[in-house]
Structure formats: C-alpha cells, structure tokens
Image (cartoon, grey):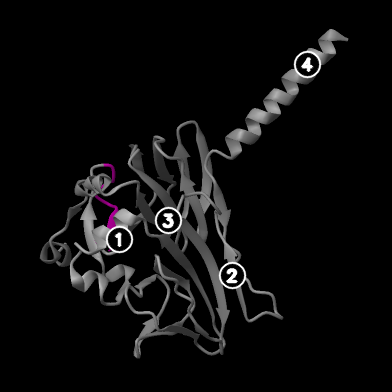
C-alpha cells in the first residue's frame, strides 16, 4: 500500500512539473477568423502578463467605421497585422496595410474604417502612465508626443546587434522617447539562423509573430513553437534565444517594456545602419 501511495505522489509530482514547464513561456495564438454573424470582435491577449500593459486583438470587417475610445492617463499603440483600411486622426487620413504602426499621441479624435470585402486585424496596446512617466513625457521632443506617429515596418531604420547574424534584418519600428519606457522593432531572416541567448532583467518583453514566422523560442530550460499571428511573453530575466530551421522564416516583432527609464540604456546595443550603406548593399 505504501509503495502504491509513493508511486502516486511521484506521478502527480511529475505531471505538475510538466504543466509548469509548459507554462514557462506564456503564448497565445490570435484567432484570425471572425464568425460569419459578427462584424467586429475584441479579445484581451495574455491578460495581466505585464503590469500596466493591456493588449487587445481587435478584428473589424469591411463597412465598419469605428471611433476609438482613448482614455486619459494612457498611451496607445496600434499594430496592424492583416487587412486593409484607413485611420483618420484629427481630420488627416492614413492608409492602413499589414505591418504598419500608429500612435495617436496627443490626438484624441481617431476613427478606423475597413476596406470593402476585407477584414482588418490589429493589436491595440494601452500603457498606463505612472507619475514618473508623466514627468518624463514633458522632457521628450515635442514632435514625438504632439504629432501622430505612423510608419510601415519596412520603412523603419535598420540596425545591427551582436546577438544576431549578418543575414538578419532588424528594424527599430518604435524608438524610445515617444511613449515612456517602450520601444519596438522587428527581426527578419531565413533559416538556418538564430538569435543568440541573452538576458535583460531591466525589461519585460513580448514577441509578436508576423507573416510566415515559423521558429522555436527558448527561455532557460523551456521552449515553445512560435508561429505567425501569435503573441508570447519572454519570462523576465530569463536567458532566451530564437532558432529558425533551414528553409523557414523568422519574422517577429519585439516589444520592450522597461521597468524604468534607466533600463533604456540596453537599446545602445542596437547600432543603426547608415541609410546610404544599406541602400548600396
């Protein structure tokens, strides 16, 4: 009887460890199909993973015109990942296409519309501002905070980093000093390739899988398949890396949420590529 009880305890322990291991790299796959009877949907992704950060996957169908609800005390980031449409901010119209970023900044009058017979998918990220954030915003360049920020990923500044191969194309999609303690960028390459193991205890990080992304992400002893249109959270302070096999694509967006502004020194490891040099490679 005692032997059976000991075996049962051992079995339960093993199963518990297995469940914990599976949860070490939190990941959520975006639902890219909308029910036929619905024109829009909104779902919180990786709820409560990062303090002060709320991420919603929003889907709108053609014909929908939606006025955005932007609350005081927050800054908002829109990441458009699939579909066509337009955004109007303070009476100026911007064309939406996959892999563009939009920050309303100080503009409160914002509305979205979707191209006919299309479906628009995007992430709406809300960052709750701390008292220190509000003070820091006053020191940021006025052109960074008073005007709309809108960019297509492929038009953004390229950079190199020691942990990545020379074949990798990295871009800074959202530089720091637009929204306190936040920066974002993309990583793109074809396998076989990898991003070497590294750690950054000064920031929380999300990865968003972009078109055709098909890689494996490692964090300490855990690993998880990371496909396109999924969002994962790198465990804080973990040694993490990314690997892509031969013939497959690595293409994801990193989102850095720094614990404090001093942590932004990490971004100095990104060395901007001279535009002339990049155009003539």
Whether residues under marks 2 and 3 lie with C-beta atoms below 8 angstroms apart, the answer is: no
Nearer the observer, 266 or 84: 266
Residue 156 placement, left or right of 232: left
Query: Residue at left 70%, top 29%?
Result: 15
Magenta stretch in the rendered image: 163-177
Q: Position of residue 224 (x, y in %)?
A: 53, 43
Secondary structure under badge 3? strand
| N-term-proximal mark, 1 vs 4 | 4
Residue in the image at 42% along x and 85% along y: 86
Examine the rendered structure and indicate whether residue 147 appears above or below residue 132.
below
Instruction: Compute the Cα span from label 4 to label 2.
Output: 46 Å
Task: Indicate the position of residue 77 as horizontal and vertical percent values.
Answer: 39, 67
Disc 2 crowd rating (10 Å Cα; few below 14, some 14-19, many 20+) is few
The residue under label 4 is 7
The answer to whether residue 112 is above or below residue 175 is below
In-image side of 101 versus 71 (left or right) = left
Q: Position of residue 202 (x, y in %)?
A: 32, 41
Which residue matches tag 2? 42
């Amino acid at each position: 009887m005692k032997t059976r009880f000991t075996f049962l305890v051992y079995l339960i322990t093993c199963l518990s460890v297995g469940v914990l291991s599976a949860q070490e790299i939190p990941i959520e796959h975006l639902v890219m199909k909308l029910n036929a009877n619905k024109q829009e949907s909104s779902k919180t992704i990786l709820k409560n993973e990062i303090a002060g950060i709320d991420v919603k996957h929003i889907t709108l169908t053609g014909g929908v015109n939606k006025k955005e609800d932007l609350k005081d005390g927050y800054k908002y980031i829109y990441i458009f990942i699939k579909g066509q449409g337009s955004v109007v901010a303070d009476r100026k119209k911007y064309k939406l296409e996959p892999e563009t970023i939009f920050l309303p900044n100080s503009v409160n009058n914002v509305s979205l519309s979707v191209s006919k017979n299309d479906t628009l998918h995007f992430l709406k990220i809300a960052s709750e501002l701390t008292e220190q954030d509000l003070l820091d915003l006053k020191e940021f360049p006025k052109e960074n905070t008073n005007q709309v920020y809108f960019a297509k990923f492929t038009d953004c500044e390229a950079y190199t980093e020691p942990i990545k191969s020379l074949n990798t194309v990295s871009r800074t999609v959202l530089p720091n000093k637009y929204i306190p303690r936040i920066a974002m960028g993309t990583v793109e390459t074809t396998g076989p390739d990898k991003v070497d193991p590294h750690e950054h205890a000064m920031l929380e990080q999300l990865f968003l899988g972009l078109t055709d992304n098909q890689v494996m992400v490692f964090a300490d002893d855990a690993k998880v398949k990371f496909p396109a249109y999924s969002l994962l959270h790198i465990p804080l302070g973990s040694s993490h890396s990314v690997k892509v096999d031969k013939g497959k694509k690595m293409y994801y967006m990193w989102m850095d949420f720094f614990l404090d502004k001093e942590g932004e020194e990490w971004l100095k490891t990104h060395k901007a590529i001279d535009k002339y040099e990049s155009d003539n490679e």
